[in-house]
Amino acid sequence: MSVSNDSYYKPEEALQELMLQERILCTAIDIQALLGLLVDKGIITKEEIDTFRFKVMNLPKYKNSIEEIERLKKDFSAAKDNPEAYLKAILNAKINGKIK
């Protein structure tokens, strides 16, 4: 998760990360509770929620972020599967001045 064992561990950064994760989790809980209430009261159906979720996810405002997250997940999965190639790519980027 967000707490690190390495020598560069910074408590203030870990605390900020934990607070962000807590805020995201609380927001997800609130949304699930609200959607559950709306479905229980017959105001909206689960199918309508799925339809609107799909529409919102495909808005450029969200779609670009979702695609970037998926791309990064794929990249980090590849790095996990082949750490040697990942480290070589980082070293090459560092040497070529692409990262500091």
Image: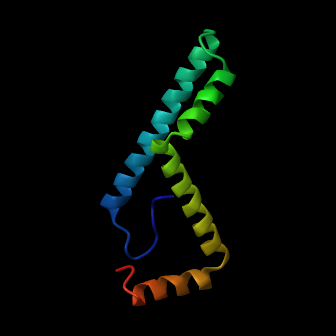
In-front residue for pair 9/38: 38
* Residue 96 quadrant: bottom left
The correct choice, above or below, for 99 with respect to 73 in the image is below
Whole-percent x and y of residue 99? 38, 79
Q: In the displayed structure, would residue 96 be above or below residue 35?
A: below
**Residue 78: x, y in percent?**
64, 72
Question: For the view shown, which residue lies furthest in the front direction?
Answer: 60
Q: Position of residue 1 (x, y in %)?
A: 51, 58
Q: Residue furthest bottom?
A: 95
User: How is this picture coloured?
Assistant: rainbow
> Quarter-wise, where is residue 72 in the image?
bottom right
Front-most of 91 and 29? Answer: 91
Instruction: Locate residue 42 relative to residue 24 in the image: left or right.
Output: right
The answer to whether residue 24 is above or below residue 64 is above
What residue sits 62% from the left and 64% below the top?
A: 74
Query: Residue 71: where, in percent of width, then height?
Result: 57, 61
Residue 65 left/right relative to 54? left
Which residue is found at the position 57% from the left and 16% from the top? 37
Number of marks present in the image shown? 0
Q: Is residue 78 above or below residue 57?
A: below
Q: Looking at the image, which residue is at 55% across and 39% down? A: 57
Query: Which residue occupies 62% across, 25% down?
Result: 49
Residue sitting farthest toward the left? 12
Closest to the observer, 48 or 41: 48
Placement of the C terminus among the 4 image quadrants: bottom left
